[in-house]
Image (cartoon, helix red, strand yellow):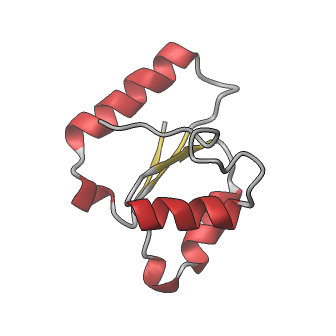
Amino acid sequence: MDVTTTVEAGLRSATDQAQLDFAIAQHRVIVTGDADFLRLASATPAADHPGIVVCHRQSLSLREMIRGLMLIYEVLTPEEMANHIEYV
């Protein structure tokens, strides 16, 4: 599993659309707490995105979020995550 943060990708001050475009170009699933990505994904032509995982940080501990992300990683293939949204 290869994880890249927004900062590492040089996208810290980038728009949500620029971050989604990066994820699409790099075939990376976005992990976010920002519901704007759901709107952007639905507006993406043919809903063509590598997948989005929505984490609500207010209701989960870091440990719970990591467990949820690991479960998704273990259960779903990249092909199954494509154009798919999961909630943790």
The residue drawn where x is 64% and y is 48% is 10
The residue drawn where x is 39% and y is 67% is 83
Judged left or right of residue 11, residue 1 is: left
Judged left or right of residue 38, residue 52 is: left
- Which residue, as the protein is rendered here, is positioned at the far bottom? 45
Vertical comparison of 81 with 56: above or below: below
Residue 37, given in percent of the width and then of the height, sits at: 63, 59
Vertical comparison of 53 with 67: above or below: below
The residue drawn where x is 49% and y is 25% is 65
Vertical comparison of 4 with 80: above or below: above
- Report the front residue among 38 and 17: 17
- Report the front residue among 33 and 14: 14
Residue 32, given in percent of the width and then of the height, sits at: 60, 44
Judged left or right of residue 83, residue 54 is: right
The residue drawn where x is 46% and y is 66% is 24
Residue 40, given in percent of the width and then of the height, sits at: 63, 69
Quadrant that contains the N terminus: top left
- Report the front residue among 49 and 23: 23
